[in-house]
Image: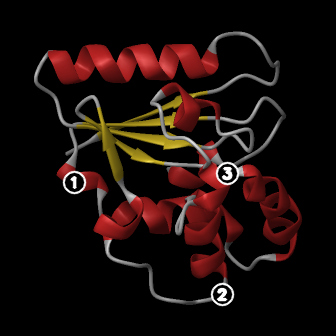
Amino acid sequence: MSKIIGIVSQKGGVAKTSTCRNLATVLVKKGYKVLAVDGDNQASLTDCFGIGRPEKLEVSLYHLMMDVMNDRDLPAKEKYILVRDGVDIIPSSIELSAIEISLVNAMSREYVLKTILDDIKDDYDYVLLDSLCVATHKQSYAQ
């Protein structure tokens, strides 16, 4: 059973992404299987792991969330989970900034992230959620 940890704060620049990156790295070094989810539309965690040009990725968190909201099947996890330094990552991109508007009108919006994680979370000891620096409810959706 995985533990889901949200790294959250309404304030920007308080080391949420650094905390997530460092925690993921330490947990992997201790032998745990870790998934890090970049929930930042600036793709800071994605960048921290050396994944360049996130806007060019075929699938990011934005695409997965849109698939769930539009009742489309999610792609195979090999299509969207990238591995860097032993950490599995669901990357982000600038497109994620548009998701807030879509979430406002989405049915069962509190389950969008949960739906994405439900199929894969048991593959991990820890799932770390790096959040936006603005007040959102994305992390509460993963409950």
Residue 38 position in % (x across, y down): 56, 41
Disc ID at residue 88: none
On the question of residue 52 being in view, the answer is yes
Residue under label 3, please give it: 93
User: Quick one: label 2, few (<14), some, or many (20+) residues within 10 Å?
Assistant: few
Q: Answer with mark 1 or mark 2, whichever residue precedes in sequence.
A: 2
Residue 49 position in % (x across, y down): 45, 30
Q: What amino acid type should be assigned to the residue bearing mark 1?
A: Asp
User: Quick one: label 3, few (<14), some, or many (20+) residues within 10 Å?
Assistant: many
Q: Answer with mark 3 or mark 2, whichever residue precedes in sequence.
A: 2
Look at discs 1 and 3 and give the one toward the viewer: 3
Residue at figure coordinates x 41%, y 63% from the top left: 80
Asked whether 99 or 49 is in front, the reply is 49
Task: Decide if residue 77 is on the left or right side of residue 52.
Answer: left
Q: CA distance from mark 3 to mark 2?
A: 19 Å
Residue under label 1, please give it: 122
Colour approach in the figure: secondary structure
Q: CA distance from mark 1 to mark 2?
A: 24 Å
Label 2 sits on a secondary structure element that is: loop
Judged from this view, the residue extending furthest toward the top is 14
Task: Decide if residue 16 is on the left or right side of residue 100.
Answer: left
